[in-house]
Amino acid sequence: MNDFYNDVPKPFKKFFSDDFWGNFDHMFQEFESQKQSQFPKTNIYESGNELVCILLLPGIERMDDINLNVNSNILSVSGTIHLPFEGYHSNKEEIFEGSFKRDIQLPFPVRSDKVMASYKRGFLKICLYRLLVKTSQNSIVIEDLEKE
């Protein structure tokens, strides 16, 4: 590798300096943080006043490992994924393991008192319902100025 670097003309040496490779490190770090911010993968389905959120969460053995919170139009999901391979050396990792937190923007505010969640075969299903704000319709008395 050193022979290659020594044979490169001077204008290119600056291009391939440590700054060049440092930019790649920054890019990969940014990519990793973006990947984590989009975990778990999520689909949201809407029908009338109902939302169904499906989250891909493989390997959850205890429901205590997942925390759900709803605040207006934000669904917060956090928890920990444990894979049962302690003592092994990793050769390749594509399946996320560890703590996660994701805030999911919902298309409308939802009721926090009516949330149902279930987990089956790696999918967390969350049913949410639109928060309907009661608008008070006060009748307005119109004064008849003709009667005077």
Image (spheres, rainbow, N blue to C red):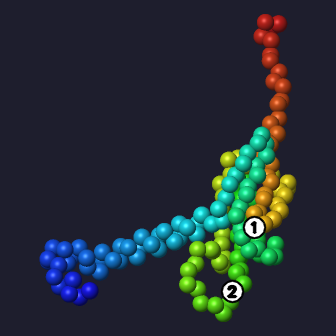
Quarter of the figure that contains the C terminus: top right
Residue 34 lies left or right of residue 7; in this view the side is right
In terms of image quadrants, where is residue 79?
A: bottom right
For label 1, the crowd category at 10 Å Cα-Cα, with few meaning under 14, some 14 to 19 and many 20 or more, is few
Q: Point out the residue furthest to the bottom here.
A: 87
Q: Nearer the viewer, residue 116 or 121?
A: 121
Q: Position of residue 60 (x, y in %)?
A: 76, 74
Residue 130 lies left or right of residue 10; in this view the side is right
In terms of image quadrants, where is residue 133?
A: top right
- Above/below status of 51 relative to 76: above
Q: CA distance from mark 1 to mark 2?
A: 18 Å
For label 2, the crowd category at 10 Å Cα-Cα, with few meaning under 14, some 14 to 19 and many 20 or more, is few
Instruction: Report the residue marked by disc 1.
Output: 122
User: Is residue 110 in view from this perspective?
Assistant: no
Dot 1 or dot 2: first in sequence order is 2
Q: What kind of residue is marked 2? A: Phe
Q: Which residue lies at the image location 68% right of the left edge and 89% below the top edge?
A: 86
Q: Which residue lies at the image location 26% right of the left edge and 86% below the top edge?
A: 1
Q: Position of residue 112 (x, y in %)?
A: 81, 56
Q: Which residue lies at the image location 76% right of the left edge and 49% below the top edge?
A: 51
Residue 2's tag is: none
Residue 85's tag is: 2
Q: Are marks 1 and 2 in contact (CB under 8 Å)?
A: no
